[in-house]
Image (cartoon, rainbow, N blue to C red):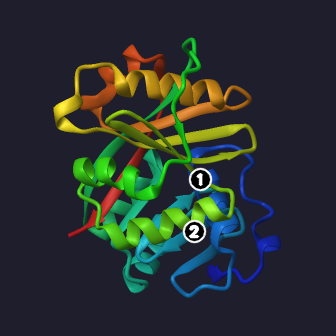
């Protein structure tokens, strides 16, 4: 059974640790439960979903039912789903989606503080991450400014590189959107920026999500693979 949640207290059983759980918790902190475009659900008591405009995150418990979840996702306009590796394989059998395996990497290196741009204007950050990832400006800006205003996310910049600290919750932090403008690559900006961000997050375990092709870059910057997730994109 899948039920929409209407209060933060109903997510009290969300696991304290884990990338998927912290992503859901970050959305809850930023948006609460009152928006129609940001919704939260429970499934069989110990699984939880968050939906942000058709982009779903699933923190799956031991009683998760892949078929019921797949039917729910299809009915509720799921465009993409981020979830654990095992449950993702089960859901994909019913959902019929394009599957991308994603590495969870944890920082275990030596972080070196640096003089980086703290809380730079979002227009400057977008000029870098938008150029590299192709994000549309308005939805990215609205979401990021909202997350920053509610103390969930923060941006950092160094020369032609930028990144986003998506959240720092329960001793776990997630870095994303690490980007360098094409004309400034190979000069060490992204590496210095990553190290400085990890130094800033020294009270937490620091994670990053990446595809296989980026493992060498992050490994060279002190990260090691510690798990796998699945991204399913509806065809």
Query: Dot 2 lies on which element?
Result: helix
Which residue is at the front of the view, 139 or 14? 139
Q: Is residue 186 above or below residue 80?
A: above
Q: Residue at x 22, y 30 (%)?
A: 184
Q: Which mark is residue 146?
A: 2
Task: Give coordinates of residue 123: x percent, y percent.
Answer: 39, 58
In this rendering, position of residue 65 left or right of residue 44 = left
Which residue is at the front of the view, 15 or 130? 130
Query: Dot 1 lies on which element?
Result: loop
Task: Give coordinates of residue 192: x percent, y percent.
Answer: 44, 21
Q: Residue at x 30, y 52 (%)?
A: 127
Q: Which mark is residue 153?
A: 1
Q: Residue at x 51, y 31 (%)?
A: 116
Q: Is residue 128 above or below residue 159?
A: below
Q: Can you tell which quarter of the image residue 76 is in?
A: bottom left
Task: Give coordinates of residue 55: x percent, y percent.
Answer: 42, 69
Nearer-N-terminus badge (1/2): 2
């Amino acid at each position: 059974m899948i039920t929409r949640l209407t209060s933060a207290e109903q997510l009290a059983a969300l696991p304290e640790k884990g990338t998927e759980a912290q992503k859901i918790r970050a959305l809850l902190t930023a948006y609460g439960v009152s928006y129609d475009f940001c919704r939260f659900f429970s499934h069989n008591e110990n699984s939880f979903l968050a939906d942000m405009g058709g982009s779903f995150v699933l923190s799956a418990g031991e009683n998760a039912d892949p078929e019921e979840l797949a039917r729910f996702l299809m009915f509720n306009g799921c465009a993409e789903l981020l979830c654990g590796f095992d449950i993702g394989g089960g859901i994909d059998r019913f959902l019929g989606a394009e599957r991308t395996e994603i590495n969870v990497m944890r920082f275990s290196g030596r972080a070196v503080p640096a003089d980086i741009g703290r809380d730079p204007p979002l227009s400057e950050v977008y000029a870098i991450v938008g150029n590299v990832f192709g994000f549309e400006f308005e939805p990215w800006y609205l979401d990021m400014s909202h997350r920053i205003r509610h103390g969930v996310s923060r941006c950092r910049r160094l020369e032609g590189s930028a990144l986003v600290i998506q959240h720092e919750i329960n001793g776990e932090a997630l870095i994303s959107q690490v980007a360098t403008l094409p004309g400034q690559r190979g000069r060490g900006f992204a590496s210095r920026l990553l190290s400085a961000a990890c130094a800033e997050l020294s009270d937490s375990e620091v994670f990053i999500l990446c595809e296989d092709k980026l493992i060498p870059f992050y490994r060279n910057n002190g990260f090691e693979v510690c798990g796998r997730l699945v991204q399913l994109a509806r065809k």
